[in-house]
Amino acid sequence: MMKTAAAIGMATAGFALPAAAQTEITFHLDFLVNGYHAPFYIAEANGMYEAAGLDVTINPGRGSTDAISTVASGNAEIGFADAGAVAQAVANGAPVTVVAAILQEAPYGIISYTEDGIDEPTDLHGHSLAVVPAGATTQALPAFMALNEVDPDQVEMITYNFGATVPSFLSGQVDATIGYLFGEFLAARNEADRDVQIMRFYNWGFDVYSNSIIVNNSFLEENPEAVRAFVHASIEGVEYAMENPEEAVQAAAANTETPFETLLEQFEVALPLIYNADAEANGIGSMTPEKWDRTQRVNVEFGEQSDMVAPEDLFTTEFLPQ
Amino acid sequence: MGWLRSRWKSILFFLFLIVLWQVAVDSGFLLRFIVPSPTDVLGEIAGRWDRLLMHLGYTLMIALAGFVIALAIGVTMAVLIAHSRFLAESLYPILVLSQVVPTIAIAPLLSIWFGPGEVTKLIVVFLITVFPIVVNTTAGLLQVDDDLLYVVKGLKASRWKIFVLIRLPNALPSLFAAMRISITLAVIGAVVAEFVAGSIGLGYVVFTGAANVNTRLVFAAVVLLGAMGIALFTAVKLLQRVALPWAQGTKEGEA
């Protein structure tokens, strides 16, 4: 009798007190759903964001530049975009800040057939290369070429849309294409009739950060606790995905038409870039001023970025788990 | 059945092309990852039917909504252009400018200004769809027989009466011709919009398939888009038959 009364009392008390309002966040991804987004999708599906007081909607994007402009314009509060592209945008006045470098290593590079022997940057001379201006790889391309003494006039660069680069490469219209390790490279490798290789920028002077969580500056000022909660819950998502890759990838698969097997392969290939030695030692998403300096410098000295951005205007580690 | 019997030659031809396509892929003449066979495509559609239906519904909704908006605004613009020199001289250049600038180029800008949601998509569909409607309706309103106008003006017909009783009915056949063009443009507009933003719709499915070199998925979405376009076009054709029984003209092929 008493137990029932107590239960009813608690239930009505629960109804009387309004639940704390969840902060609504639109999280705009760098591209379409890929395996490396699984941590975010599992964090959403398993209620990690909800438990942190956040109502998160994840939207696939159309390239790092799209994600950056969407967050900069306030159409999304938080986004996911390549660090190099973000630094260039901030140098041009975009009001965003990086709060976690989830992808610790640049995953992009140039994909070609092994037999063509494009093993070093200068091997590109005399070949054609598919590029996509809106993507992080092409944004970093001028710096990559300058740093490695590749003469742009000796490389035939042809602009394509995202979806056309790999088919053009596979059908022989171009000798090589830009692409991500766990995106275009996997797709090319799985469909090609010959050996395919990727020349990662990371191994040629680009010891830099890649896809990171970025926040709109106004939102950051007004909702620091929500940002902290988002970063922590996202990192929780990464840790959960490491322990439960198939469940995490399944959460991503539910939001796209790309098959589960493809997404799983993408996640497994991406994981060493998320959980590398630095992440193991200093935490997932951790950032150092030195690596950020390198991330910027390579684009300022050799690429299209106008000036170095002061670290405090570009990133902050205060929202990472301490 | 009479419809089927009268068209058996064209249907047979169509089936022949499909068989040719299937044989070309199965024999290896066409590479499977570049061109999946009809059975591959049908298998993909069947395997993903629920989700593809959802995407189709969304694209259909965007295309139709954008089309209706373009119809309403386009016809209004045509009426204004026909009756006001000032508006004709102000609106027409803006309209032509909006067509000369490729919509796919400004769509990302629209996405920044209006967000990556439905508003941007409807604007894209509107921009791609409205031009034929304005041009054709304006022409239809203005190209009335001079002798007829002379007579009714002699009978002291007001501008309004002339508009409602003569110009508007005169414009309807042209308007319907424009609608046939615009309804297919509306589908294109919805696809273009989905390429640029959002995470749902057959255009988005095409983009996802293309980016992952999943040509089966691309073809599946394209086939559904084609079917949708044909269905909408036919619907407008039937609508004209119902709405304008007095203006059917000569049938195609019987000129």
Image (tube, coloured by chain):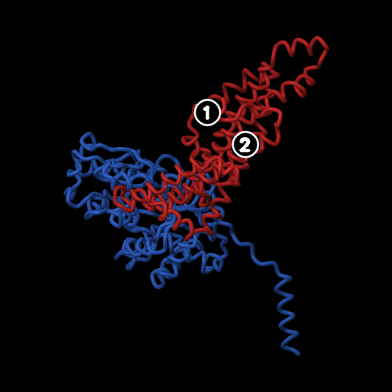
Chain colours: A blue, B red
Is residue A310 something one can see in this rendering?
A: no
Q: Nearer the viewer, residue A154 or A222?
A: A154
Look at discs 2 and 1 and give the one toward the viewer: 2
Residue at (83% x, 12% y) in the render: B156
* Chain of residue at mark 2: B
Vertical order, A224 against B71 (above or below): below
Q: Nearer the viewer, residue A312 or A279?
A: A279
- Circle 1 sits in a helix, a strand or a loop, which is it? helix
- Circle 2 sits in a helix, a strand or a loop, which is it? helix
What is the three-letter code of the residue carrying label 1? Answer: Gln
Is residue A179 something one can see in this rendering?
A: yes
Q: Are there few (<14), some (14-19), or many (20+) residues within 10 Å of tag 2?
A: some
Residue at (20% x, 46% y) in the render: A121
What is the three-letter code of the residue carrying label 2? Answer: Lys
Vertical order, B74 against A284 (above or below): above
Q: Is residue B240 left or right of residue A144?
A: right
Mark 2 vs 1, N-terminal side: 1
Query: What residue is disc 2 on?
Result: B237
**What is the x, y in percent for residue B69?**
64, 37
Vertical order, B102 against A234 (above or below): above
* Chain of residue at mark 1: B
Q: Are there few (<14), some (14-19), or many (20+) residues within 10 Å of tag 1?
A: some
Q: Nearer the viewer, residue A76 or B159?
A: B159
Q: Is residue A33 left or right of residue A131?
A: right
Cα distance in 3D space between marks 2 and 1: 25 Å
**What is the x, y in percent for residue B219?**
43, 49
Query: What residue is disc 1 on?
Result: B99
Q: Nearer the viewer, residue A268 or B248?
A: B248
Residue at (77% x, 19% y) in the render: B162
**What is the x, y in percent for residue A179?**
32, 49
